[in-house]
Image (cartoon, rainbow, N blue to C red):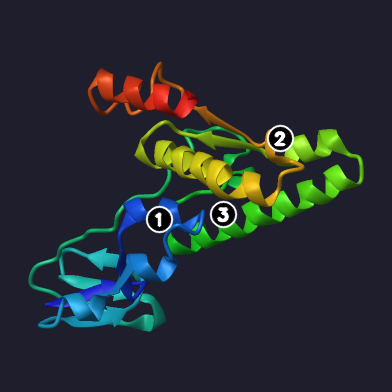
């Protein structure tokens, strides 16, 4: 058995949200693939094409491999639903590096807002601290919860002069959040987030 992957680790996606606020270290959510598949060969490559007739997988760097049985488990990519500007202005939370990037950008915005407030630019400070999360599925809802806790438990204490400016808005196209679960679950979580 040979496992092919462009990254040498697995990661636990639900904990990715915690890495954006520092509750969870990015290193705590990853596991090396080699540690979890000891009886398999692992190759860190990106697969580019498959020849089903000749049972070959073509990877980067000109590598090709023959196979008897092929399992394709590529995961998924975030869906932008064709909304203009999402790719350019949005931040996705799908990979470990995304968690680091979101955290860094958030902290930079907070520092910038603190300076703006001190310089008398209250409107700019409010704008910088207005966080919009798009998607009322598990990741979006968890991120809103983590961000709200981060604001209440850490940021309001560290940045008392701009504490009142923090705002988190969850945008969802459907009439409720967590619609893949029973209505009572989505309703309960929505009430909790709004409080």
Q: Residue at x 43, y 66 (%)?
A: 26
Position of 130 with respect to 175 (left or right) is right
Task: Give the alpha-carbon distance from disc 2 to disc 3, as whole Å.
Answer: 19 Å
Per the rendering, the mark at residue 16 is 1
Q: Earlier in the sequence, mark 3 or mark 1?
A: 1
Q: Nearer the viewer, mark 1 or mark 2?
A: 2
Q: Is residue 119 above or below residue 41?
A: above
Q: Residue at x 36, y 68 (%)?
A: 28
Give the farthest residue toward the top.
175
Residue at mark 3: 102
Q: Is residue 189 above or below residue 52?
A: above
Q: Earlier in the sequence, mark 1 or mark 2?
A: 1
The crowding category of the residue bearing disc 1, from other C-alpha atoms within 10 Å (few below 14, some 14 to 19, many at least 20), is many
191 and 66: which is toward the camera = 191
168 and 61: which is toward the camera = 168
Q: Is residue 168 above or below residue 194?
A: below
Residue 94 in view of the camera: no
Residues at discs 3 and 1 in contact (Cβ within 8 Å):
no
Residue at mark 2: 165
Task: Give the alpha-carbon distance from disc 1 to disc 2, as whole Å.
Answer: 26 Å
Q: Residue at x 30, y 54 (%)?
A: 75
Q: To which quarter of the image does residue 120 belong?
A: top right
In the rendered image, which quarter contains the N terminus? bottom left
The crowding category of the residue bearing disc 2, from other C-alpha atoms within 10 Å (few below 14, some 14 to 19, many at least 20), is some
178 and 158: which is toward the camera = 158
Give the farthest residue toward the right.
119
């Amino acid at each position: 058995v040979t496992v092919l992957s462009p990254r040498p680790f697995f990661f636990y996606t639900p904990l990715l949200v915690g890495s954006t606020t520092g509750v969870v270290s990015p290193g705590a959510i990853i596991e090396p693939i080699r540690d979890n598949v000891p009886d398999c060969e692992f190759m860190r490559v990106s697969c580019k094409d498959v020849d089903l007739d000749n049972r070959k997988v073509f990877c980067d760097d000109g590598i090709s491999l023959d196979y008897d049985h092929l399992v394709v488990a590529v995961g998924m990519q975030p869906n932008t639903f064709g909304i203009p500007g999402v790719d350019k202005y949005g931040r996705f939370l799908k990979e470990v590096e995304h968690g680091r990037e979101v955290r860094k950008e958030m902290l930079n915005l907070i520092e910038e807002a603190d300076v703006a407030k001190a310089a008398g630019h209250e409107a700019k400070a409010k704008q910088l601290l207005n966080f919009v999360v798009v998607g009322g599925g598990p990741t979006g809802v968890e991120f809103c919860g983590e961000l709200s806790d981060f604001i209440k438990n850490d940021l309001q204490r560290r940045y008392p002069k701009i504490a009142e400016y923090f705002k988190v808005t969850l945008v969802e196209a459907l009439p409720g959040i967590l619609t893949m679960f029973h209505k009572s679950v989505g309703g309960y979580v929505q009430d909790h987030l709004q409080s």
